[in-house]
Image (cartoon, helix red, strand yellow):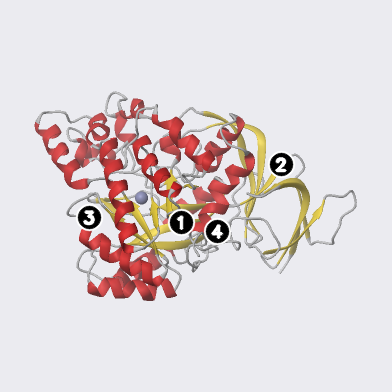
């Protein structure tokens, strides 16, 4: 194994900022030392980080590579999606393996291992989607926790597909309370939403913007409230995914004020985009169809505030791209047939850095919500999410002054549009290391499919 020294940068973690040199040996960080004129150590390779931030690689705890949805598949494979993630400064993803109705968790997990194995440019782990809660799948949860799949997503939305009723949710929560698993919830009242969808389509309200109108903020808030109460009854922790509505944030804040183990995640699309995008003409709004939906811009302030106060703890992408041509177009004339999901795995670190530039969050909070907190939440810390002796050498050299314009012309995600087309941001990834190996070297991709390794995870580190 070779040793690498990263010299002269500003090391930023969730806890501190220091002008330090970082020594890497055998894929791990072995030491940090105050930056000095003399080389503090001999190393095989020296990387000059002068003028750059040296930050932990991003941890994106919510991606859906190759996900089947509505008769098609998310357009990024594990190969293309993890390469794009690396370009954007993310070095670990936690993707969602899916249990099919009528099958066990094991078959679903095996299928996702087969998709990812040998194809990833960066490290990866799995959550498990529980689509069919029954005696067998509940028992299987215990085995999965033992092998590092420690979080389980349930859906209060999508009746007939992923939906679980309150009884099934309660059973899964009770089980998680016993085995240390973390229940992740898609909190929208899907039964009520489906009624509104049917009524909207019947009345000819078929444009993409109606996707946002039927999936009401109140129905997100109601489901969030219900999920919290069910978790309290079961005695289990709860992680609410992709929170987008002020009213839903309020439910999470109230629970946290009571000291309950309730956590919330939001995504860049809810922080930077709005129903104005969904209303773009000529069916362009379809590019922004995802669930929970984009909200009116007024909701953004509550999300930013909650990120500052830690009422929301994590920013993940929910990366689930579908091409506009041929995939999003499946819903022309009927918004309910538009595949739900948006690209973003490559954009998250930059968009959140832009929030630093604009004074919405501090640099350390940027690293916390994008690297450290997701690593802690999902049992990967301090191997991932920080720069400290013993941690994996997943490190990004970030140029805080570089200007860029986001565009489908230049991004690396396998999707024919950018949700942030034409947006100017300050700051850009320069170099990326994954376990000490260069993946991006001064804006050149030098990684390879198969470098990324499966990461078994421990249980949530915010508990007990
Ligand atoms: Zn998702």
The answer to whether the residues at label 2 and label 4 have Cβ atoms under 8 Å apart is: no
Q: Distance between the residues labelled 3 and 2?
A: 46 Å
Question: Which residue lies under the disc numbered 3?
Answer: 163
Left of 383 or right of it: where is 422? left
Some atom of ligand 1 lies within 8 Å of the CB belonging to the residue at label 4: no
Describe the element under mark 3 as helix, strand or loop. loop
Q: Could you tell me residue 452's position as x and y percent?
A: 53, 62
Up the image or down, 88 lies above or below 68; here it is above
- How would you rate the neighbour count of disc 4 (Cα within 10 Å): few for under 14, some for 14-19, many for 20 or more? some
The answer to whether the residues at label 4 and label 1 have Cβ atoms under 8 Å apart is: no
Q: Which residue is drawn at 83% across and 49% down?
A: 35
Point out the tag, 3 or 1, that comes first from the N-terminus.
1
Q: How far apart are marks 3 and 1 (CA)?
A: 29 Å
Q: Indicate the quadrant where residue 290 lies.
A: top left
Question: Which residue lies under the disc numbered 1?
Answer: 79
Describe the element under mark 4 as helix, strand or loop. loop
- How would you rate the neighbour count of disc 1 (Cα within 10 Å): few for under 14, some for 14-19, many for 20 or more? many
Mark closer to the observer (3, 1): 3
- How would you rate the neighbour count of disc 3 (Cα within 10 Å): few for under 14, some for 14-19, many for 20 or more? many
Point out the tag, 2 or 4, that comes first from the N-terminus.
2
Judged from this view, the residue extending furthest toward the right is 38
Q: Distance between the residues labelled 3 and 4?
A: 37 Å
């Amino acid at each position: 194994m070779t040793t690498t020294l990263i010299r002269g940068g500003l090391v930023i973690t969730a806890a501190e900022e220091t002008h330090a040199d970082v020594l890497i040996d055998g894929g791990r960080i072995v030491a940090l030392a105050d930056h000095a004129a003399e080389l503090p150590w001999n190393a095989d390779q020296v990387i000059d980080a002068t003028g750059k931030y040296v930050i932990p690689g991003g941890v994106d705890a919510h991606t859906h590579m190759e996900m089947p949805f509505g008769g098609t598949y998310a357009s990024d494979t594990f190969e293309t999606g993890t390469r794009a993630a690396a370009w954007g400064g993310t070095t670990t993803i936690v993707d969602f393996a899916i249990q099919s109705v009528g099958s066990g968790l094991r078959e679903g997990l095996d299928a996702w291992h087969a998709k990812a194995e040998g194809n990833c440019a960066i490290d990866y782990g799995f959550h498990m989607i529980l689509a069919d809660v029954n005696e067998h799948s509940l028992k299987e949860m215990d085995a999965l926790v033992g092998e590092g799949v420690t979080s389980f997503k349930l859906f209060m939305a999508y009746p007939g597909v992923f939906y679980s009723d309150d009884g099934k949710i309660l059973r899964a929560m009770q089980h998680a309370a016993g085995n240390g698993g973390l229940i992740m919830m898609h909190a929208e009242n899907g039964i009520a939403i489906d009624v509104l969808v049917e009524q909207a389509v019947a009345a000819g309200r078929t444009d993409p913007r109606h996707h946002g109108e039927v999936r009401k903020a109140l129905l997100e808030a109601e489901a969030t409230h219900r999920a919290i109460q069910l978790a309290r009854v079961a005695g289990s922790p709860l992680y609410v995914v992709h929170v987008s509505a002020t009213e839903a944030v309020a439910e999470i804040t109230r629970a946290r004020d009571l000291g309950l183990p309730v956590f919330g995640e939001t995504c860049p699309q809810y922080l930077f985009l709005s129903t104005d995008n969904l209303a773009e003409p000529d069916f362009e709004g379809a590019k922004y169809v995802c669930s929970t939906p984009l909200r009116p811009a007024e909701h953004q302030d509550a999300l930013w505030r909650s990120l500052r106060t830690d009422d929301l703890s994590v920013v993940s992408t929910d990366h689930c791209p579908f091409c506009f041509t041929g995939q999003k177009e499946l819903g022309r004339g009927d918004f309910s047939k538009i595949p739900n999901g948006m690209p973003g795995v490559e954009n998250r670190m930059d968009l959140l850095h832009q929030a630093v530039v604009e004074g919405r969050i501090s640099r350390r909070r940027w690293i916390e919500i994008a690297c450290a907190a997701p690593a802690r939440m999902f049992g990967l810390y301090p191997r991932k999410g920080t720069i400290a002796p013993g941690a994996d050498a997943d490190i990004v050299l970030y140029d805080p002054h570089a200007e860029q314009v986001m565009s489908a012309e230049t991004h690396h995600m396998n999707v024919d549009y950018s949700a942030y087309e034409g947006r100017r941001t300050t700051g850009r990834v320069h170099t990326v290391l994954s376990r000490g190996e260069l993946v991006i070297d001064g804006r050149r991709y030098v990684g390879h499919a198969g470098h990324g390794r499966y990461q078994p995870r421990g249980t949530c580190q915010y508990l007990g």
